């Protein structure tokens, strides 16, 4: 009888784990960030990456100590002129849209993020028909990556998997 209870509990925990695991990495109140290149030409892709790098040094550091999505929004609003002057240096038409924007399905570090509309800050360069670069402004994951630290060896643990291991050992 005890084995049946354990097996039932394990199956229940596994079903909950697999059912809930799709969106566990990005919190609900996150702010995504995206730069869409004019096209996929080498020049346009290089320009997109240069703008990204300039924004990292001019803006992302301001977000380093942000404690909430509301605080991040205020920082972005208060520094819009810095963002625009950074992009203006590249002499390319652009639009900035802050609000609910569509993101296609993305995969990052082995985790799939579902397509949908998300609170985000999107910079569209020129015709915005090229590949894009994206990250998360809040929590400030962009900043972690821009600092050049290697997060490939970060280990994610599952609370349910730990309980399951304890029960079965």
Image (tube, grey):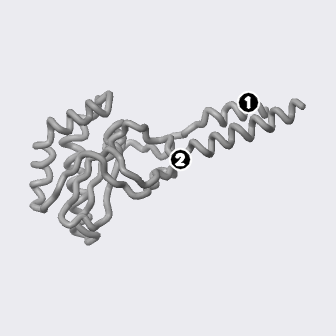
- Residue at left 72%, top 34%? 165
Q: Quadrant of the N terminus?
A: top right
Q: Quadrant of the C terminus?
A: top right
Quadrant housing residue 66: top left
Mark 1 vs mark 2, CA separation in Å:
24 Å
123 sits left or right of 105 in the view: left
Q: Horizontal and vertical percent for residue 38?
A: 22, 66
- Residue at left 64%, top 40%? 16
In front here: 65 or 147? Answer: 65
**In this figure, what is the number of numbered marks?**
2
Numbered mark located on residue 35 in the image: none
Outermost residue, right side: 1
Badge 1 marks a residue whose secondary structure is helix
- Residue at left 85%, top 36%? 4
154 sits left or right of 47 in the view: right
168 sits left or right of 102 in the view: right
In front here: 101 or 107? Answer: 101
Mark 1 or mark 2: whose residue is earlier in sequence: 2
Outermost residue, bottom side: 41
Badge 2 marks a residue whose secondary structure is loop
* Viewer-side label of 1, 2: 2
- Residue at left 82%, top 32%? 5
Quadrant housing residue 64: top left
Q: Horizontal and vertical percent for residue 31?
A: 33, 41
Note whether 147 is above or below 159 in the view shown.
below
Quadrant housing residue 68: top left
Q: Which residue is mark 1?
A: 166
Q: Which residue is mark 2?
A: 22
Q: Crowding at label 1, few (<14), some or many (≥20) Cα neighbours within 10 Å? A: few
Q: Horizontal and vertical percent for residue 167?
A: 76, 30
């Amino acid at each position: 009888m005890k084995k049946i209870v354990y097996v039932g509990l394990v199956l229940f925990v596994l079903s909950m784990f697999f059912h809930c695991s799709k969106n566990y990495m990005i919190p609900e109140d996150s702010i995504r960030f995206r730069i869409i290149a004019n096209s996929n030409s080498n020049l346009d892709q290089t320009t997109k990456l240069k703008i990204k790098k300039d924004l990292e040094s001019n803006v992302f550091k301001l977000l380093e100590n942000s404690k909430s999505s509301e605080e991040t929004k205020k920082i972005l609003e208060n520094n819009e002129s810095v963002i625009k002057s950074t992009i203006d240096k590249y002499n390319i038409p652009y639009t900035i849209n802050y609000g609910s924007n569509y993101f296609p399905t993305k995969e990052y570090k082995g985790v799939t993020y579902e397509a949908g509309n998300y609170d985000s800050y999107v910079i569209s360069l020129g015709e915005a028909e090229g590949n894009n670069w994206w990250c998360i402004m809040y929590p400030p994951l962009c900043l972690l990556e821009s600092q050049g630290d290697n997060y490939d060896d970060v280990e994610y643990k599952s609370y349910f998997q730990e309980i399951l291991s304890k029960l079965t050992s």
